[in-house]
Structures are given as C-alpha cells and as structure tokens.
Image (cartoon, grey):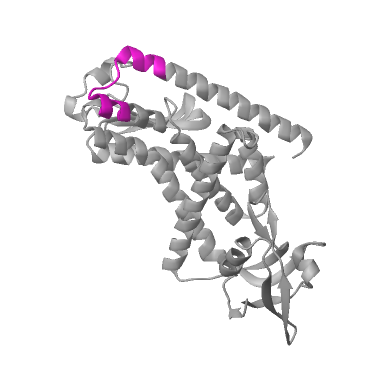
C-alpha cells in the first residue's frame, strides 16, 4: 500500500509540475504576470512567494493550475488582478502568444515522455524485433507449413532479409497468396511455403507466429530519435483509441486516479525504470486529454481562440462563464465515470 501511494504521488506530481511549468515558463517568456503556481487543489499545505508569483502545494494532488493576470478576462477577477498593467495581462496578448501559452502544457508532457523514455532506453536498450520464431500457434498457417519454434527467417520469396518489419509487411499484404520462406533450422536451411490468413480483428494477414524481441543499445542520438518516434506512435494510437470509443467501435474504458495509483504501484514493484516507463505513457495520455476541446481544459481554450480568430473578437464574458460551467460539468462526469470503472476493476480483481 505504501509503495502504491508513493508511486502515485511520484507519477502525478511529476506530470503536473512539468505540465504547469510549461504554461508558467511560456507566460513569463511573453511577459504575462503569473499570480500563482499551484500543485493540487483545495487548502494550501505549503506556500511561498517569489517575485510576483505565489507557489503552493495543496491538499488534493489531482491536478494543478497556473493563474495568470487576465486569464479569465473579466469573468472572475479579484482586486489584485484588476490592478495588473494591461501589457502584463494574458487577455491583452496577441492571439498567437496566448495559444502558445496554453499549448505549452501538453507540449511539455510530450517532451517529458520523450525524456523519460530516453532514460529507460539508455539503460535497458531499445526493444527490437528479430526474425527468430518464439511461438507457433497450433493449427495456424505457420504450423501447417511446418515452421517450428527456433526457426530463423533468412529470406522471403528468395530475397534475403534481416528486417522484421519488412517480413511482416509482406505477410500482412498478401492474404491467401503463397509465400516462400527460407528458414535456418540448426545448421540446415529449409524452404517452406506458407499462405497468410486474413485476420478480421487485426485487419491484416497473419501466419500465426510470435517473433522474438531483443534490446539493442544505440548511440544517444538514435536513442533520442527512437524515444521521440515511440512517443509519437503512442500519441497517435491513444488518439485513435479515443476516436474508436467516441464512434462506439470499442467499449469506453478509462482509468481514473484509483486506476493510475494501482498500476503505478504495480510498476514500482517491478523497478524504478518500469515506473518511469509508466509515467511516460500516462504523460502522453495527459497531453491528449488536455487537448480535448472541452472548456476549462487547454483544448477548450484553444477552441475559444479559434472562435475568436474566425469571428474577429472574443466570446462575450457572460457566455464564457456558461461555457466554463458546461466544461466543469463534463469533467466531473468523466471523473465519476472513471472512478466507477476503477472501483469495478479493483472489485473484480483485474
């Protein structure tokens, strides 16, 4: 339990601090006065002031915020905020600067994921598929063709290859077509003919084998490149998963604070590098979540800025208030749904 709590605090704190720091540093860069930088919500536990900004840690570590002068226009302002010079107010900055300030949070989460993955890959190496067969599914095309565990693919249709992706692409794009594989079995080379079978769930042809994976250590530049490439793929896959949920193609399954805490605890028990990997994955999800066009999220602000750009002037303050109210209702509804799913998973032991 203690490991789970500490792991959860580590993951959430890291992601929130980096996200809010993105907003903070970009706001300072463009000369916006930052009134407060808070980790968590609710009553303050610790606070101190540096320059014009109050930094605080609050009771509920489920988010954070950076309060900037003029961030909410004239919807919610105290006396202190109304005294800020116009040149230091968020709402008096050019649209492109406001957009960058808002987008900086999700961007920093993406950067964090790349950095964390770079650390992990630098220590463990980069998982790379090889052409050695680790498992053959009984009754599948490979099994029927005589492919065995331990076979190493040397060539496809007489063309030598050492690239797993190339082999998979040929197999995937030739459903029902006979393919000749040259394999090495011990000291012997054997030619086998296999017919890939279309798999509706995967939307591609398969021969029903599992290839091996090995970790390769690369130079720092290639490691960084592969880290960024992996994070981009994660982002795209997460976005596609969300799209499929919206379209009703897959069931809506999300993890809330309880789910994240449970998985973080499991990752921490497997080692610190596993916890960093998990943090990288969650950071990508957090970036995408914040870019959703829901009011009060970063994507909601960007949507309002787009409306302002098209219309030529911002939305009226009284309407902005209603938009924020709707956004808060949506976020609370999602939080309740995610918590409900977390509880169900814990109860059934998943």
Q: Is residue 46 left or right of residue 314?
A: right
- The residue at 56%/52% (across/down) is 277
Q: Is residue 166 left or right of residue 79?
A: right
Residue 39 in view, yes or no: no
Q: Is residue 10 left or right of residue 85?
A: right
Q: Is residue 136 magenta?
A: no
Residue 70's spot in the image, x, y percent? 27, 24
- The residue at 63%/65% (across/down) is 171
Question: Quadrant of residue 205 in the image?
Answer: bottom right
The one nearer the camera, 293 or 278, is 293
The one nearer the camera, 257 or 95, is 95
Which contiguous range is marked in magenta? 305-323
Question: Quadrant of residue 191 in the image?
Answer: bottom right
Residue 149's spot in the image, x, y percent? 77, 71
- Quarter of the image that includes the C terminus: top right
Residue 10's spot in the image, x, y percent? 54, 43
Question: Quadrant of residue 189 in the image?
Answer: bottom right
Q: Is residue 306 magenta?
A: yes
The one nearer the camera, 100 or 242, is 242
- Say above or below: 105 vs 331: below
- Say above or below: 179 vs 79: below
- The residue at 26%/24% (across/down) is 311
């Amino acid at each position: 339990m203690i490991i789970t709590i500490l792991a959860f605090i580590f993951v959430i704190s890291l992601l929130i601090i980096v996200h809010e720091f993105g907003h903070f540093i970009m706001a300072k860069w463009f000369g916006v006065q930052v009134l407060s930088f808070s980790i968590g919500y609710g009553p303050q536990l610790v606070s101190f002031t540096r320059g014009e900004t109050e930094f605080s840690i609050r009771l509920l570590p489920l988010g954070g915020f950076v309060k900037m002068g003029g961030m909410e226009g004239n919807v919610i302002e105290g006396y202190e905020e109304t005294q800020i010079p116009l040149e230091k107010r968020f709402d008096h900055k050019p649209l492109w600067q406001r957009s960058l300030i808002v987008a900086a949070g999700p961007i920093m989460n993406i950067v964090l994921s790349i950095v964390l993955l770079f650390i992990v890959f630098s220590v463990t190496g980069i998982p790379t598929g090889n052409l050695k067969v680790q498992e053959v599914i009984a009754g599948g095309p490979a099994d029927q063709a005589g492919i065995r565990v331990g076979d190493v693919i040397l060539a496809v249709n007489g063309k030598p290859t050492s690239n797993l992706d190339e082999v998979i692409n040929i197999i995937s794009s030739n459903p029902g077509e006979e393919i000749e594989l040259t394999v090495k079995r011990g000291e012997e080379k054997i030619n086998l003919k296999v017919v890939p079978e279309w798999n509706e769930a995967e939307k591609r042809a398969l021969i029903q084998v599992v290839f091996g994976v090995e970790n390769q250590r690369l130079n720092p530049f290639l490691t960084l490149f592969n880290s960024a490439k992996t994070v981009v793929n994660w982002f795209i896959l997460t976005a596609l998963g969300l799209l499929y949920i919206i379209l009703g193609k897959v069931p809506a399954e999300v993890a809330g604070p309880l789910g994240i805490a449970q998985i973080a605890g499991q990752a921490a028990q497997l080692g610190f590098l596993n916890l960093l990997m998990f943090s990288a994955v969650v950071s990508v999800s957090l970036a995408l979540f914040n870019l959703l066009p829901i009011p009060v999220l970063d994507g909601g602000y960007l949507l309002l800025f787009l409306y302002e750009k098209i219309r030529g002037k911002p939305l009226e303050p009284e309407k902005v208030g209603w938009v924020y109210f709707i956004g808060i209702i949506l976020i609370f509804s999602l939080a309740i749904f995610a918590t409900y799913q977390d509880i169900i998973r814990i109860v059934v032991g998943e």
